[in-house]
Image (cartoon, helix red, strand yellow):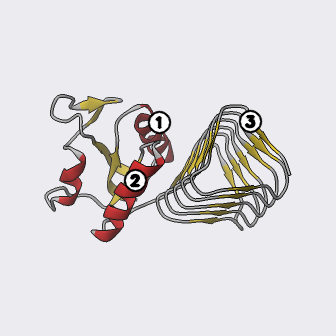
Amino acid sequence: MYKHLVVVGSGGHGQAVADLALSVGIFDKISFVDDSFPQNTKALNLDIIGNCDSLFSGTLELDSCIVAIGNNKVRRKLVEKIIGYSLPLVSLTHPKAFVSDYAEIAPGVVVMAGAVVGTNAKLGTGALINANSTIDHDCLLGEFAHIGVGVNLAGGVKVGKEAWLQAGCSAGYYIEVADGASFQPGTVLRL
């Protein structure tokens, strides 16, 4: 059990991640930090306890944190700062996702409901796997890659750092996606 999870970002994705964290049932308390504070003090009926910089002030008592911001560059910047401050960065997997026991998940990864992560898949730091996506066997996701809702990656796909495959994209076997690449919803990637 953890005492206090701080979710960085209280927008739509942040609230979805907090909902995931509530469903896991291992946190005594879940709060947000968000730059909308102090104008906003609640999201999803949970407290917003400060802005993002307050996370690094040394005044918050926490034993886990997760960055829940969809923008890859912003997520990377915050995760790197969290690591630099030696704050306890966790990964979260929804209880209704399937992750192979043989997959590797780096810190700061979020795997949402209905996602499947296959055998020998490797998910880099800060990667985001949205609902109902499939990351099949031997896929490699670079740091801060963003896999949209309903994306399907066949075996052996390599997704570069900070790449973004938007909702409904699919990639055939052994496709390689360049660092920073972005694909519109429904794009089919072939050799």
Q: Which residue is mark 3?
A: 187
| Residue nearer the viewer, 85 or 178 | 178
Rendered image quadrant of residue 167: top right
Foreground label between 3 and 1: 3
Rendered image quadrant of residue 160: bottom right
Q: On residue 16, which mark appears? A: 1
For residue 149, side relative to residue 39 (left or right): right
Would residue 88 be visible to someone looking at this image? Answer: no
**Residue plotted at (13% across, 58% down):** 59
**Residue plotted at (60% across, 61% down):** 142
Mark pair 1, 2: CA separation: 12 Å
Residue 123: percent from the left, percent from the top?
A: 61, 61
Residue 92: percent from the left, percent from the top?
A: 51, 53
Mark pair 3, 1: CA separation: 25 Å
Would residue 90 be visible to someone looking at this image? Answer: yes
For residue 22, side relative to residue 177 (left or right): left
| Residue nearer the viewer, 96 or 79 | 79
Q: Element type at marker 2?
A: strand
Which amino acid is tagged 1?
Ala
Residue 33: percent from the left, percent from the top?
A: 26, 44
Between discs 1 and 2, the one toward the N terminus: 1
For residue 63, side relative to residue 20 (left or right): left
Between discs 3 and 1, the one toward the N terminus: 1
Quadrant in which the N terminus is drawn: bottom left
Q: Which residue is mark 2?
A: 66
